[in-house]
Amino acid sequence: MRRPNTSEKRKYTTITIPTKLFENIREKIKTTGFSSVSDYATYVLRETVAELNERSGKKEAHGVVEKLKALGYMS
């Protein structure tokens, strides 16, 4: 079985943030387990996207319940 090389395992892109924000984050993470601003930003973005997905799922589920009620399947 062929092992994927590093570039096949992970792909990255670059995002731009204000310098002042970058410096602020860099100072704040000095006492944490994050090794870089990039690691911290990735963590925050993953958490945010997960929360948005959860909210979206709840919203969709609520819409399904409302449709079932309108059709008389639920009261």
Image (cartoon, helix red, strand yellow):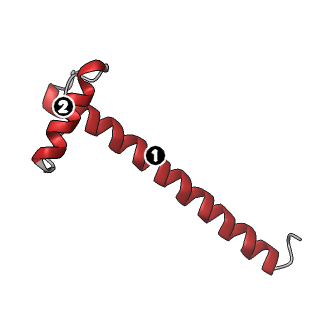
Horizontal arrangement in the rendering, residue 55 relative to residue 14 (left or right):
right
Residue density around tag 1, few if under 14, some if 14–19, many if 20 or more, within 10 Å: few
| Residue 20, percent from left and from top | 14, 45
Label 1 – label 2 distance at C-alpha = 24 Å
Horizontal arrangement in the rendering, residue 75 relative to residue 9 (left or right):
right
- In the rendered image, the quadrant that contains the C terminus is bottom right
- In the rendered image, the quadrant that contains the N terminus is top left
Disc marking residue 50 = 1
Q: Which residue is mark 2?
A: 26
Q: Residue at x 31, y 21 (%)?
A: 32
Number of residue marks: 2
- Observer-side mark, 1 or 2, equals 2
Residue type indicated by callout 2: Arg
Name the outermost residue toward the right: 75
Q: Residue at x 31, y 19 (%)?
A: 33
Horizontal arrangement in the rendering, residue 31 relative to residue 72 (left or right):
left
